[in-house]
Image (cartoon, coloured by chain):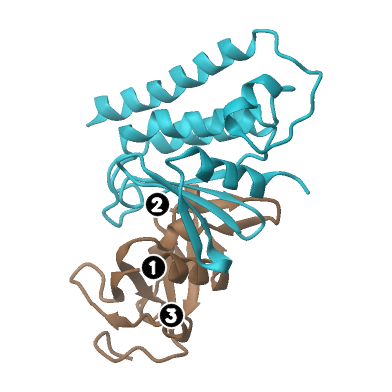
Chain colours: A brown, B cyan
Amino acid sequence: MSEHDRIDDAEILWRRIHVTHLVDTGGGPRVASAAFKTTDLSIDRAGLVESAGGDIRVTAAGGAGVAELAALQYRTVALEPVPDPIPENPAHAIVRGVISRGQATALSRACVFRPI
Amino acid sequence: MSVTIERLGQDWIAEHDRYELARSKPVSTTRRYELIDPSTASARATGAPLWWERVTQQLVDIARLPANWNGYDERPLSQALVTPVIALLSDLRLAGLPGPCPSPLADGGLQLDWGPNGEIVVEFAPDGRAIALLPDQDICWALDERAGLTQLFNLLAPR
C-alpha cells in the first residue's frame, strides 16, 4: 500500500478522540457526535501507520484514543476519504468539506473507540 | 490567550457560585414539576440534581482548553457561551430535568447530549445561539424563544 493509493473500502481509518468527546449518557462511554462535527476531517490510514512501525498511539497522541472506522463506513454516509500525505505524516488522509450533523451522528454511532 | 482562557474559566465558576447562592435561599418544595414551562421553573425547585457538579466541572475543564486542543486546529470555547449555557443548565436544574454531557465543538461552540446514543442534542454556536436536535428524526429547532425551550424540556421530562 502506498500513501497515494486510493483508499479501499475495507481500509481502517483512525481519528484522534479527545477526552472531552467521550461521553456517558447512560449507556456507557461513547464517542460524541461532536468529535466529527468539523470541516476537512483529518484521519490516519491505520495500515500505513502500522507499516511504519506505529500503532494507535501515534494517531491518539495527546488524546484518549481513536475512533476506528472502515472507509466504507464513511462512504455509506456519502463521505469520501482521500489520501492526503504530508511530510510529518505520510499516513494522513482527509474527508474534505463540512461534515453534516447527520453524518457526524452516523459516524459517531458506527465507530469503535479504541483507548490508548 | 491564556489570560482569556483563565478569565473564561473564572466566569464559569462565578456563574456557578452565583447560582449556588441563589439556591441557598428557601424554595417551595410543595409541588412537583409539570415540566412544561421553563419560565416558572424556579417556583418549583425541589433540590440539586446529582449532575450539576459533574457538568459544571466538565464545563470549566472545556473552558480551559487552549486553541488546537485536539491537534486538529480547534478553537477555544467562545466566551459568548458562558451566560446562555449556564442559564440553560440552571433552568434544567430548577425543573428537575436530567443533565447533559457537554462536549466542545471544533469551531468554539458547545454540544450538550442526552440519551444513551445522544438522541437529544443541543448545539451552541460560538455566538451563543442555540438549536436543539433530534438526530434520529432529522428535526431541529431554535432555542431562542420560550416555545423552543418548552419543547426541549418536554422531551427531557421523564415519562
Mark positioned earlier in the residue sequence (2 or 3): 2
Label 3 residue SS: helix
Q: Residue at x 70, y 51 (%)?
A: A26
Spatial CA distance of label 3 from label 1 is 12 Å
For disc 3, the chain is: A
Please name the residue that numbered disc 3 is placed on: A74
Residue A55 appears in the picture as rendered: no
Q: Residue at x 24, y 87 (%)?
A: A4
Mark positioned earlier in the residue sequence (3 or 1): 3
In the rendered structure, which amino acid carries the disc numbered 2? Gly
Q: Residue at x 26, y 70 (%)?
A: A89
Please name the residue that numbered disc 1 is placed on: A100
Residue B30 against residue A51 in the figure, above or below: above
For disc 1, the chain is: A
Please name the residue that numbered disc 2 is placed on: A62
Q: Residues within 10 Å of mark 2 (few under 14, many from 20)?
A: some
Q: Position of residue A95 (x, y in %)?
A: 31, 75
Residue A73 against residue B59 in the figure, above or below: below
Q: Nearer the viewer, residue B102 or B66?
A: B102
Q: Residue at x 78, y 49 (%)?
A: B159
Label 1 residue SS: loop
Q: Nearer the viewer, mark 2 or mark 3?
A: 3
For disc 2, the chain is: A
Label 2 residue SS: loop
Residue B104 against residue A11 in the figure, above or below: above
